[in-house]
Amino acid sequence: MGRLLEYFSTTERRKRAVWTKAFVIPGYDPRHYRMDANRRIIRYGDFANPASPYAWEFAREPIAHAREAADNPGNLQPLNLRDLALMTCGADTAPSPCPSRI
């Protein structure tokens, strides 16, 4: 049970660290809604939820530091799931059938 709890707390810390990289939207609660680098709205509670238009996941920064791990929050940015799907699968593919995402 301890390892499971440790995994979730680590994942939650990573989510929060990456979330702070998204832009605050004036008039919206920044704990729940922000904007990614592509100007798409994302919602914190919709992390990895392909049914939501506000879903988001981690994406690697365009220029990641080679010496740091790819899943290090310093190398990650929040990205709307639809944009991540376009980057991963191509413009005609919906998010859900995409191959692996970060």
Image: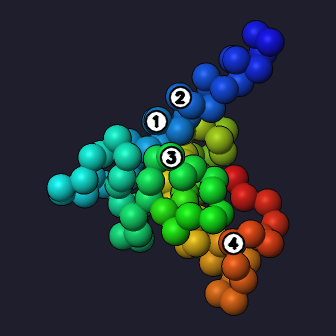
Indicate which label's residue lies in the foreground, 3 or 4.
3
Q: Which mark is residue 45?
A: 3
Viewer-side residue, 53 vs 79:
53
The answer to whether residue 88 is above or below residue 20 is below
Q: Position of residue 93 (x, y in %)?
A: 72, 83
In which quarter of the view is residue 101 placed? bottom right
Q: Which residue is mark 2?
A: 13
Name the residue at the front extreme. 51
- Closer to the chain start, of discs 3 and 2, is 2
| Amino acid under disc 4 | Pro
**Residue 31: image tag:** none
Amino acid residing under circle 1: Ala
The crowding category of the residue bearing disc 2, from other C-alpha atoms within 10 Å (few below 14, some 14 to 19, many at least 20), is: few
Q: Are marks 3 and 4 in contact (CB under 8 Å)?
A: no
Amino acid, disc 3: Gly
Which mark is nearer the camera, 2 or 4? 4
Spatial separation of the CA atoms under disc 2 and disc 4: 25 Å
Q: Quadrant of residue 20?
A: top left
Q: Which residue is mark 1?
A: 17
